Amino acid sequence: MDLGRGIFLILSLFAGHMVVGKPLIVAHRGASFDAPENTLPAFELAWEKGADAIEGDFLLTKDHQIVCIHDKTTQRLSEQNLVVAESTLEQLKTLDVGSWKNEKYAGTPMPTLSEVFATVPDGKNIFIEIKCGPEIIPYLVKEIQESDLKTDQVRMICFNEEVIKAFKETMPDYKAYWLSAFKKKNGSWKPSLEEVLFTLQDCKADGLDSQHTIPPEFSKAVLSAGFEWHAWTVNDVETVKRLANRDIYSVTTDRPKLIGSGLSK
């Protein structure tokens, strides 16, 4: 461990943090338990079910349009297998990305970021997960600036710290969270707590968005360092109640109504 990282870790563990109230309920790819993920029906249903925010996945097309889809290809959601980055918006808009879930969603098209923005009511939030590299940032910034959403309604999340860094350099007033998937190997968590705190500081992230299964000492250290902690994907009430006691800022779920109702009891 170098001296700089060591000092930062020690300070983080002993700093105080703000106590958080009831966590935001974030609908994972919309109300994706009931409706086809990352579609307008899923996002609109999420609002009907009382979600505080929606989360969607976004990629850049060949003609520099931002579309809402998790995978780099359309194989899982459509009868045609197109590579998103090698396809135009016009080509992608012809696909049916709803029938795989239920025939009542037949003909549902892939939405653009601007179309998803248009569903967000006043006082609600959107978590934009970027599934590609920093090349999307200029187009993302343009879309955000042209939307009617306020600064505090838009959050960006990404596993790639270079994307976080590029976004924060351009849009410092907007919040961005580093996504990280933790694995336990030979008795140790990877990434380590030291690596997490260093990465958050280095890419100027506002917080960590992780699996809900990370140990309490990790989330406590993140909060004590002045960062927010968010978690995914939680679909049972008992788990979300335990997380709420750990001062979590938001919980991402496929079932916003179930989780929201459970927290209110």
Image: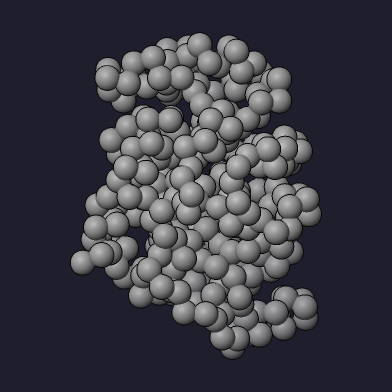
In the picture shown, does residue 181 fall above or below 118?
A: below
Where does the image place residue 90, in percent across and percent down from the top left? Answer: 60, 13
At 54% from the left and 75% from the top, the residue drawn is 223
Please state, as top left, top right, bottom left or bottom right, where the C terminus lies in the image.
bottom left
Q: Is residue 82 above or below residue 137?
A: above
Percent x, y of residue 173: 70, 59
In the image, 159 versus 118, the foreground residue is 118
The quadrant in which the N terminus is found is bottom right
Judge by depth and name the residue closer to the eye, 93 or 83. 93
Using the rendered view, name the quadrant where residue 236 is placed: bottom left
Which residue reaches farthest left?
A: 265
Q: In the image shown, does 48 or 60 lie closer to the viewer?
A: 48
Q: Residue furthest bottom?
A: 14
* Residue at figure coordinates x 28%, y 56% from the top left: 259
Place of residue 96 in the rendered image (x, y in percent of width and height, measured from the top left): 42, 15
Q: Using the image as rendered, state which of residue 122 and residue 20 is in the foreground.
A: 122
Instruction: Give the residue at x 48% y 42%.
Output: 120
Question: Is residue 92 rendered to the left or right of residue 168?
Answer: left
The part of the image, by quadrant, that contains residue 62 is top right
Residue 49 is left or right of residue 70, and the answer is left
